[in-house]
């Protein structure tokens, strides 16, 4: 709160200066509080995950998915792959062997992956971050169990949402400039989405003591404002946690 | 960056940059604010995402053997588990090529939808998105999304559709964006029928029939995007607006001075 007051006092002049500059370039008709922006950011991202989860739910409820026959599952799953979300789609047997839409049967297994183990217990998993074993790209996985009429899990449908692609999509959907800072992170402070895609999968708390402090604060709260120094500049972000993904979303500025 | 970001305090924001603030935060100073265009784009993207999610789900659903069977019993059994995520409480229907139709949870309806524009479009083989109508089965104002159902040979054997309750969608969007009473937002179709409005009492009104709105709205509907200032109910409003190719609606997002 003290920092906020400091910003307030220090920035009247900055506001006036920016107003003059803005008027010369492209004056904003009005502005939006950053808290509205971060709420929108969280809702837009959550919405994409929800859409994919719904699509997998739809496929999981079909006799084709329950058949366990990849030849029958593939056409329906391929349709889910046409959603406006860049993701790799797959089906796995309870043993962990799996097929992808892009490359068919895989030689490796996902039996050891936590999201897979959770899905095998009958629970849907949303936004669990891993590095894909098939593509090597950082992804957020959605895993939906396929159940037979008796409720027994007979397989798992998977969507690996590409975090770099989703970051760019959100940037475009919100008309954010390339220098508008936004990011998300999970309960381990592992960075998911990021305005600078090179920072995806960064373990944020290892970057500096100040960033470690800031992330500890954010992880301890559902929403708020935090400031920290990174690359020699102070950053102020507003943040909020999503109960759906379990991620924290942040939107901020560099000064 | 200075043209876009406005580091601000409450007084400066009020005088120099009218700002949209979150619900319940009227007295709190924004930490910082950003160009209202981000608000408009977020509003359009969130709304379109809800509609697109419904469309995508219906397309997947229409290709399932249960729907292709044409058996209402089979279709009805699949509906409840099929549609639940992005747009809760939508009304789902299945119609035959003659316009007779069934509604999930209500069964066969005594009227026809053969005259509805969305039905004609979907039964001709195209996806129909964004028709704003008063539901004949439920009585609420809905935006309809409808897609054709084809049999194994590609012949159109019916349509499946969803009626998105626009008052509920308005409430969802308000909550998702976390906006308070300082914001005004709306969406109108090409005929000026209000689909969404921050004041839900305006939903389904024909805004083009409101004399004080007519000229400004005609201009906004006719242009792809821009900024417009107009008076409504004795107050001046400034909105950023843009057209959505998905719904065909014009979306406005702004402030009441």
Image (spheres, rainbow, N blue to C red):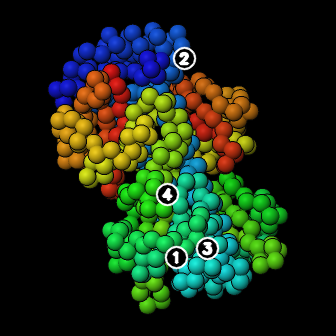
Label whose residue precedes the other's in the sequence (3 or 1): 1
The image's mark for residue B187 is none
Q: CA distance from mark 3 to mark 1?
A: 12 Å
Q: Report crowding for label 3: few under 14, some 14 to 19, many 20 or more residues within 10 A (C-alpha).
A: many
Secondary-structure class at tag 1: helix
Q: In this rendering, do the residues under marks 3 and 4 share a single chain? A: yes
Label whose residue precedes the other's in the sequence (1 or 2): 2
Can you tell which quarter of the image residue B227 is in? top right
Q: Nearer the viewer, mark 1 or mark 4?
A: 4
Residue topped by disc 3: A74
User: In the image, residue B242 lies at what x, y percent?
Assistant: 63, 35
* Image point (19%, 47%), residue name: A220
Q: CA distance from mark 1 to mark 4?
A: 24 Å
Residue topped by disc 1: A60
User: In the image, residue A163 lies at what x, y percent?
Assistant: 45, 50
Determine the residue located farthest toward the front in the rendered image.
A107
Q: Nearer the viewer, mark 1 or mark 2?
A: 1
Can you tell which quarter of the image residue A8 is in? top left
Q: CA distance from mark 3 to mark 2?
A: 50 Å
């Amino acid at each position: 709160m003290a920092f906020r007051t400091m910003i307030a006092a220090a920035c009247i002049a900055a506001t006036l200066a920016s107003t003059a500059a803005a008027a010369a370039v492209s004056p904003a008709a009005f502005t939006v509080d950053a808290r509205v922006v971060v709420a929108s950011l969280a809702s837009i991202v959550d919405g994409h995950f929800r859409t994919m989860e719904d699509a997998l739910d739809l496929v999981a409820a079909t006799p084709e998915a329950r058949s366990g026959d990849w030849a029958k599952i593939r056409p329906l799953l391929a349709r889910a792959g046409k959603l406006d979300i860049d993701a790799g789609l797959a089906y796995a047997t309870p043993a962990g062997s799996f097929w992808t839409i892009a490359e068919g049967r895989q030689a490796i297994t996902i039996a050891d992956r936590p999201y897979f183990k959770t899905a095998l217990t009958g629970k849907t998993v949303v936004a669990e971050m891993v590095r894909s074993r098939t593509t090597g790209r950082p992804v957020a996985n959605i895993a939906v169990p396929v159940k037979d009429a008796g409720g027994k899990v007979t397989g798992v449908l998977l969507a690996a949402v590409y975090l770099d692609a989703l970051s760019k999509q959100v940037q475009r959907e919100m008309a954010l400039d390339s220098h508008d800072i936004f990011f998300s992170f999970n309960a381990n402070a592992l960075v998911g989405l990021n305005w600078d895609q090179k920072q995806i999968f960064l373990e944020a708390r290892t970057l500096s003591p100040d960033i470690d402090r800031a992330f500890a604060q954010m992880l301890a709260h559902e929403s708020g404002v935090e400031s920290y120094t990174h690359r020699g500049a102070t950053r102020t972000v507003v943040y909020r946690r999503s109960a759906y993904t379990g991620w924290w979303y942040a939107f901020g500025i560099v000064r | 960056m200075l043209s876009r970001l406005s580091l601000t305090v409450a007084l400066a924001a009020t005088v120099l940059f009218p700002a949209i603030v979150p619900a319940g935060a009227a007295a709190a100073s924004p930490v910082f604010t950003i160009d209202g265009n981000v608000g408009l784009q977020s509003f359009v993207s969130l709304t379109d995402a809800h509609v697109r999610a419904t469309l995508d789900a219906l397309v997947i659903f229409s290709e399932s053997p249960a729907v292709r069977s044409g058996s209402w019993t089979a279709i009805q059994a699949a509906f409840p588990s099929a549609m639940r995520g992005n747009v809760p409480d939508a009304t789902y229907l299945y119609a035959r090529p003659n316009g007779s139709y069934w509604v999930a949870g209500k069964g066969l309806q005594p009227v026809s939808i053969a005259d509805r524009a969305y039905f004609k479009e979907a039964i001709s083989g195209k996806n129909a998105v964004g028709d704003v109508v008063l539901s004949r089965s439920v009585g609420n104002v809905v935006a309809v999304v409808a897609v054709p159902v084809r049999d194994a040979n590609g012949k159109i054997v019916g349509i499946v559709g969803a009626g998105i309750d626009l008052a509920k969608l308005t409430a969802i969007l308000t909550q998702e964006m976390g906006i308070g009473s300082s914001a005004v937002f709306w969406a109108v179709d090409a005929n000026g029928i209000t689909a969404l409005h921050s004041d839900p009492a305006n939903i389904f009104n024909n805004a083009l029939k409101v004399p004080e709105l007519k000229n400004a709205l005609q201009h906004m509907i006719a242009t792809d995007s821009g900024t417009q200032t107009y008076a409504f109910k004795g107050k001046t409003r400034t909105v950023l607006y843009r057209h959505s190719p998905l719904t065909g609606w014009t979306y406005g997002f702004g402030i009441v001075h």
